Amino acid sequence: MEPTRNRLIDLLETYDHEYVSGQFLSEKLNISRSAIWKHMKELEKDGYFIEGVRRKGYRIVKSPDKVSENTLHWGLKTNWLGKNMIHKTTATSTQYVAHDAARENAEHGTVIVADEQTKGKGRMARVWHSTKHKGIWMSIILRPPILPAAATQLTLLTATALANAIAEGTTATPAIKWPNDIMINDKKTAGILTEMQAEQDRIHYVIVGIGLNVNHTRIEFPEGLHQKATSIKLETGIEHPTVPLIQQILQYFEHAYDQYMTAGFSPIKTKWESYGYKIGEKIRIRTKHNVFEAIFSGVAEDGALLAETEAEGVQKIYSAEVEW
Ligand code: BT5
């Protein structure tokens, strides 16, 4: 990463499309004006369009949507998450890349992003469709000092970060469907896959996988998903560049993770429930032994679904088919 260039982008973006003088930049960054000019040329290679006008200075006309380790770093306002960034134009699955990297001691907060996945995976060996350049396919390596049993809380935490980023960065209204889907207008737009390597009482590492459909049109989904899946573009009518969205997700994720480590799960649970899909509504639950209707009343500390019936009161459900 190039910290000076990152600060340069930050300064230019702070003045949001206004001209910033070379003199000002060179004083702020403590480098010569010709060094500034060289940085500008490097930024252009990564897809920035920067206008330089004599006596006025520089301004960003267009930020790139080209995903690269550089563009992901520039403008990323995190303290530890994504400092180590791995970008692949193609991967079988970013989960596999992340597992390999974690086994090779990749640091806590390493992020892997791919333009496409040829073997994207969901839970229980299901397929995750990851069309090239249409969405965000990324995995985060974490080494959290928590017990393995608490790892499901990380899935819920990730969902809140995703929902925050979508709510803030787009005009869509996201809802989190238990346990790991983000819905927009009743269709799935993102899924989360949490995997870990652990002993009974110690986590070696956790990989959080995030798949978010951003710019798909209807026909870019396989036919079987037309009724169930959607993208941010389909729901808002607007094409969204992925780089700022990834950065926003990472910023919200880091904030939620730090909060979780200092204040515990309670603030995450409150946030989760503020986005909860069909909270307070009737759902139909199919467990191994039973089918029943209940009111979905929220999530428990351990990530269980809370289902309320007159006969049984509030029950914790860990694994079930839910008809929403
Ligand atoms: C998930 O599984 O929702 C977790 C998806 C995690 C994907 C990310 S992408 C980055 C990282 N690398 C990976 O290889 N995976 C992670 P699950 O709840 O099991 O849902 C899977 C089901 O969602 C499938 O069986 C389909 O019905 C549906 N599905 C598949 N692709 C989809 C898509 N692009 N959009 C919406 N739904 C999809």
Image (tube, rainbow, N blue to C red):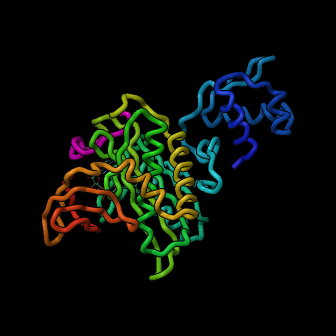
Report whether residue 192 is seen: yes
Residue 200 found in image quarter: bottom left
The spot of residue 157 in percent (x, y) is 45, 57
The residue closer to the viewer here, 18 or 41, is 18
Q: How many marks?
A: 0
Picture quarter containing residue 42? top right
- Looking at this view, name the residue that lies furthest to the bottom: 200
9 shown above or below 153: above
Q: Identify the residue at horizontal 29%, vertical 51% (top origin).
A: 279
> Closest to the observer: 306 or 177?
306
Q: Is residue 29 above or below residue 130?
A: above
Q: Position of residue 222 (x, y in %)?
A: 26, 44
| Closer to us: 100 or 31 | 31
For residue 237, above or below residue 126:
above
The residue sitting at 23% across, 50% down in the picture is 281
Residue 18 position (above or below residue 271): above
Q: Is residue 226 magenta?
A: yes
Q: Is residue 120 a member of the stretch shown in magenta?
A: no
Name which residue lies at 51% across and 79% down: 202
Q: 39 left or right of 173?
A: right
Front one among 268 and 72:
268
Q: Which residues are magenta?
A: 221-234
Q: Position of residue 7 (x, y in %)?
A: 72, 40
Mark yes or no: residue 70 visible: no
- Picture coordinates of residue 108, whole percent (x, y): 59, 64
Quarter of image, ligand 1: bottom left
* Position of residue 239 in the picture relative to residue 299 (left or right): right
Q: Residue at x 76, y 22 (%)?
A: 57
